[in-house]
């Protein structure tokens, strides 16, 4: 029986791509930290699959002929997984040891499900494969939780800075902070041109 990845090899990347696009469109965070998280997930996924393929004898359906790297669909799944971490694994924040334990056990269960669906194959009784799965996912979960938390904090910091800049007319980075035109525009927006002397020192 053929697996879905053999019949429609582009199905996984297409579904993951739609999910990622919707997330980027509707998430309440700036684009930059979200893209950074997706890039991190892709790089980590490539490295993790190298360990699983060469150290754990894991074979993905749809792998290229070279058998050195995982197929596009598994990388797409790594990227689609990353944006969900802040919701599904928020309870593991600041609990790295518990995250490693949860990831190690959960990773083995998830791959066993994939093996039974026919999208990945390996010897479930091979100790080397079990060690590779536990190691990869024991590192992945706490690391993804930390990176997703950084993404959220970076997003809030960026939005707070933008709000503060609009409120007190802070200059953009790389511009002349003493520019009279920018300073005047900021005062006009506040409607307090005549109250400059009463403004706090950090604004003046």
Image (spheres, grey):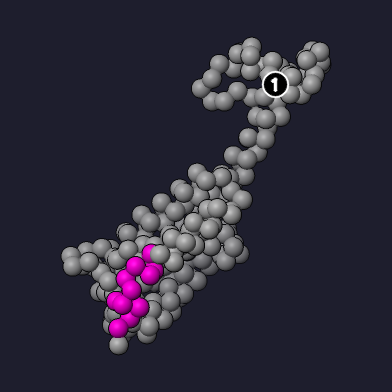
Q: Nearer the viewer, residue 23 or 14?
A: 14
Q: Position of residue 98 (x, y in %)?
A: 53, 67
On the rendered structure, is 128 left or right of 134? left
At 40% from the left and 64% from the top, the residue drawn is: 14
Q: Is residue 139 something that shows in the picture?
A: no
Q: Is residue 23 something that shows in the picture?
A: yes
Q: Is 148 above or below relative to 172?
A: below
Which of the 4 image quarters holds residue 66? bottom left
The quarter of the picture where the N terminus appears is bottom left
Q: Secondary structure at mark 1?
A: helix
Farthest left residue in view: 66
- Is residue 7 highlighted in magenta? yes
Q: Is 90 above or below relative to 179?
A: below
Q: Is 70 above or below relative to 159?
A: below
The quarter of the picture where the C terminus appears is top right
Q: Position of residue 84 (x, y in %)?
A: 53, 62
Farthest bottom residue in view: 1
On the rendered structure, is 55 left or right of 100? left
At 63% from the left and 18% from the top, the residue drawn is: 182
Q: Within 10 angstroms of label 1, few (less than 14), some, or many (20 or more) residues? A: many
Which of the 4 image quarters holds residue 5? bottom left
Q: Which residue is mark 1?
A: 186
Q: Position of residue 143 (x, y in %)?
A: 46, 58
Q: Position of residue 100 (x, y in %)?
A: 47, 66
Q: How many marks?
A: 1
**Magenta range:** 2-13
- Is residue 119 highlighted in magenta? no
At 64% from the left and 11% from the top, the residue drawn is: 180
């Amino acid at each position: 029986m053929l697996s879905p990845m053999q019949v429609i090899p582009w199905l996984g990347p297409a579904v993951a791509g739609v999910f990622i696009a919707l997330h980027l469109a509707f998430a309440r965070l700036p684009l930059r930290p979200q893209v950074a998280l997706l890039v991190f997930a892709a790089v980590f996924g490539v490295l993790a699959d190298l360990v699983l393929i060469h150290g754990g004898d894991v074979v993905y359906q749809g792998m290229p002929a070279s058998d050195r790297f995982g197929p596009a669909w598994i990388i797409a799944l790594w990227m689609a997984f990353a944006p969900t971490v802040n919701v599904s694994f928020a309870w593991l924040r600041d609990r790295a040891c518990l995250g490693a334990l949860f990831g190690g056990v959960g990773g083995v269960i998830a791959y066993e499900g994939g093996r039974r669906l026919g999208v990945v194959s390996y010897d479930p009784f091979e100790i080397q494969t079990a060690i590779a799965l536990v190691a990869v996912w024991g590192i992945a979960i706490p690391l993804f939780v930390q990176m997703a938390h950084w993404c959220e904090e970076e997003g809030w910091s960026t939005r707070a800075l933008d709000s503060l800049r609009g409120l007190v007319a802070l200059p953009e980075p790389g511009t002349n902070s003493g520019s009279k035109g920018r300073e005047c525009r900021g005062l006009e927006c506040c409607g307090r041109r005549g109250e400059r002397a009463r403004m706090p020192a950090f604004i003046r």
